[in-house]
Image: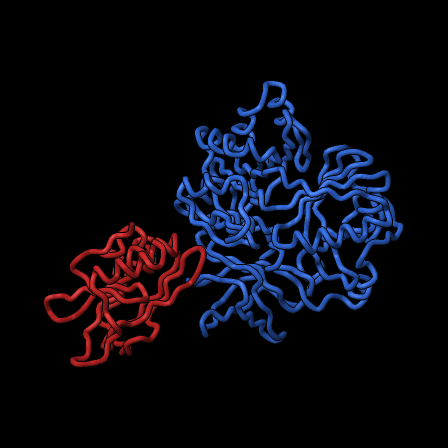
Amino acid sequence: MSKVPADLKYTKTHEWLRSLPDGTIEIGITDHAQHALGDLVFVEVPEAGRVLKAGEPCAVVESVKAASDVYAPVTGEVLAGNPKLASQPETINTDSYGEGWLMRVRPTAGGPATELLSPAEYTKLQQEEGD
Amino acid sequence: MGRQTPLFQLHRELGARIVDFGGWDMPVQYSSQIGEHHAVRRAAGVFDVSHMCVIDLKGARVRPFLRALLANDVDKLVRPGKALYSCMLNESGGVLDDLIVYFLSDSGFRVVVNAGTRDKDLAWIRRHAREFDVGVLERTELAMLAIQGPEARAKTAKLLSRVGAATALELDTFVGREIDGWFVARTGYTGEDGFEVMLPASDAERVWRELNSLGVASCGLGARDTLRLEAGMNLYGNDMDESTHPFESGLSWTVAMEAAGTARERQFIGREALEAVKAQGSPRKLVGLLLEERGVLRGHQRVVVPGLGEGVTTSGTFSPTLERSIAFARVPAATGQQVQVDIRGKLLNARVVKPPFVRFGQALAQ
């Protein structure tokens, strides 16, 4: 069973969001997602300054097996992509909710967001997908 | 649900992720695909390849039948047990399948064909076997394990009788024989030394567990794919199929236009079409690509060849041994050293290299 930390929000497309005290958010892919992808070998994160629209592809994670898009859960400006992932993409396999974060974003106040799930809802989604 | 090999329940028990492969429920990985890959390059791994189709051909005229059926020349097979890699072509020179054929006796050969092409191959073989009065028997009761890696032969030998072990360890490359009721062949699809073993399905689970206890890692089809691509070996359906001929698939070396050891022309299905291609020169060729930038090559990506046009990748992956991406691509015949590959709209530089990329654990392309 994949880990689903209680202090995060989730999306139907397997991203997680962490609200930071300064009002920005950190985004990554879930333990379930990294497990399904397998060994990650290439990650492309957006550059600081890029403005994301909720629902658009904003990063790519590639395992030995397959490439997968990461979708922006909120509208906002990218503050930073995780620089560690260029040389150590496997960090997402070992610590998807911590060191393996993908990007930090300052959400546009009142801007659109995709439907966010609670930990319980996301756990249920995983079970439906056969985790 | 697809077809299942005799090892299906064991794969589940070992925690394998199961995927559909040519209509079969097969393990793609157990823990880490890269870990399984390295196990084969550095020590030993075992693959379930029981989905592949073993066919025994029997009859006094089996050799002339195979001379006509296959693009490679079975007359190269002189010693019993010797194996040959060949394409089976249609009349237009397209590749129906690639296979391994073993010479067992003057009246008996064995061929091993791909799982995904099983029905088509059997129909084609049966159709042509009739006029040679050759019997075609599918050996569905056999399981098949590939034990591969520098330690694979020594570990497999531990499961055999003393005499059997000695016999197995003396097998030359690309030779197989009956040993202790199994058919043991020194063949594989990884670029490493090792055995492929055909054995009664009822033995398969016990043998797998014993190999595991000897330190042989369970390996899935994911690692099998990265290993074969590093080893420069084609995958049927990706790198060649009925719409492509061997000369544009990196398989010219498997086509014997002349009879073994002579300059005499020989007849086989597809020969006429290949002659026409040869006369004009094949406009395309299959090459290896090494990505010079960060990213991962996959099949079906557009290849831009400056001044010559375009090509397409047929297989691509991240190479765990080289720690960069590699691919096969079908490109214009005059393609030189440098191409670009379109990955999600960005053109990335790739260098053209001659496969294999890796052999016996050593990186050949850098």
In the figure, is residue B213 to the left or right of B115?
A: left
State the scheme by which the image is colored: by chain
Residue at the image position 58 percent from the left and 68 percent from the top: B312
Q: Which of the 4 quarters of the picture holds residue B53?
A: top right
In the image, residue B176 sits, relative to residue A4, either above or below, namely above
Q: Position of residue A44 (x, y in %)?
A: 35, 65
Q: Position of residue B145 (x, y in %)?
A: 56, 38
In the image, residue B278 sits, relative to residue B210, either above or below, namely below
Residue at the image position 68 percent from the left and 29 percent from the top: B178
- Which residue extends farthest left? A21
Residue B120 or A70: which is nearer the viewer?
A: B120
- Residue B154 visible (yes or no): yes
In the image, residue B344 sits, relative to residue B325, either above or below, namely below
In the figure, is residue A52 to the left or right of B6?
A: left
Residue B9 or B219: which is nearer the viewer?
A: B9
In the figure, is residue B282 to the left or right of B294?
A: right
Figure colour of chain A: red
- Residue A82 visible (yes or no): no
- Which residue extends farthest right? B264
Which chain, by letter, is blue?
B
Q: Position of residue B160 (x, y in %)?
A: 57, 24
So how many labels did they put on this image?
0
Q: Position of residue B142 (x, y in %)?
A: 62, 37
- Which residue extends farthest top? B162
Q: Which of the 4 quarters of the picture holds residue B39?
A: top left
Residue B30 or B19: which is nearer the viewer?
A: B19
In the figure, is residue A71 to the left or right of B10?
A: left
In the image, residue A37 sits, relative to residue A17, either above or below, namely above
Residue at the image position 26 percent from the left and 74 percent from the top: A114
